[in-house]
Amino acid sequence: MDRKNSTGSSVASFLKKLVISVLIVEAVAVVFIFALFHLIPASLYERLLAEELAQRTGLRFQSASFDTAFPLAFAMEGLKLYDNAGNELVRLENLRAGLNPLGYLGGLKISIDAKASGGQIDGVARVGFFRSSFEMEARAIGFKAIPALERAGMKIDGTFDAMLVMKKDDGCPKGSLKVQGVEFKDAEFSFRGLPLPIDDIDEAGLSAEFVNCGVRLDGLWMEGKDLSARIKGEIKMASPLSSSPVDLTLELVPNEGLLKKEFLLSLLQQYRKSANYYSIPLKGTLGGIEAGE
């Protein structure tokens, strides 16, 4: 009996020492990671991130300030994203990306907190050995956070909500993007440099899926007093991102007010399919979309 008690005590003592040793090793590893992370100059992180972004997407970013933050995070102010031609695409007031120091065994977890044009963006990215995922929710984002819209002929004062979900096991990523909760204060639209008399927009939204190494645009739509419009089609993703070929169609249904503006509609005559339905093919790449024949 004494021998059994002695053996049991020895096993318990061994397990206790093992648990304490593991905890000490993990604590030392965490302290080492903390120290190493903050000893590396922030400028080096910024350069590495910029190089990785350019290599994978052809895009580049610029920030008014870039620094590390406690415990393990990057903090950026005045962040702007550009395409390879130097055109500004997106701007954020600030962004904080926090790394999970205890999740390294199951993969890296990155928490994202950002503000853009008065709105809030929250996201979580998980990067593992065999799979990765990204989820993002944006609330009350001002359209002014996307300068690319104005270059495309859409000058919008308003806000929107968005939800993005992406997963990647092997091969190409899969997921979805939805834009809803759109509110317009004022909006001006143009086509080929000519202003479009579109007023009183009631609804707008976007629904897209990431499939077959590309984006299937189920609908980018808008309903207004004078016009109903919808863009649908596919974008085949390429690197750099700006070289991705597009195969889209812009569908227009003028309402009574716009049908009276004969001069404007005459510019779209070649795209007319019926009395009040126009179908305009949009071709090219993300870096330069043009109306087809």
Image: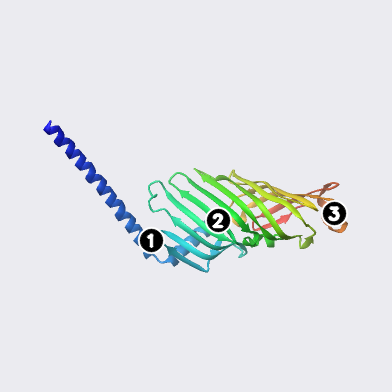
Q: Secondary structure at mark 1?
A: helix
Given residues 185 and 92, the one toward you in this image is: 185
User: Where residue 219 sits: x, y (%)?
Assistant: 69, 47
Residue 168's label in the rendered image is none
Circle nearer the N terminus (1, 2): 1
Residue 131 x/y as whole percent = 47, 44
- Mark 3 against mark 1, which lies toward the viewer? 3
Residue type, numbered disc 1: Phe
Q: Position of residue 97 (x, y in %)?
A: 47, 58
Q: CA distance from mark 1 to mark 2?
A: 25 Å
| Residue linked to disc 2 | 121
Q: Amino acid at mark 2?
A: Ile
Q: Are marks 3 and 2 in contact (CB under 8 Å)?
A: no
Crowd rating for badge 1 (residues with CA inside 10 Å; few <14, some 14–19, many 20+): some
Q: Residue at x 84, y 48 (%)?
A: 276
Mark 3 crowd level (few <14, some 14–19, many ≥20, 10 Å Cα) = few
Which residue sits furthest top? 1
Nearest the eye: 12 or 290: 12
Placement of 138 over or under 131, stated as above or below: below
Of callouts 3 and 1, the N-terminal one: 1
Question: Residue at horizontal 44%, vertical 59%?
Answer: 73
- Is residue 140 shown left or right of residue 127? right
Q: Residue furthest bottom?
A: 64
Other residues around mark 2 within 10 Å, as few (<14) / some (14–19) / many (≥20): many
Q: Which mark is residue 257?
A: 3
Q: Amino acid at mark 3?
A: Gly
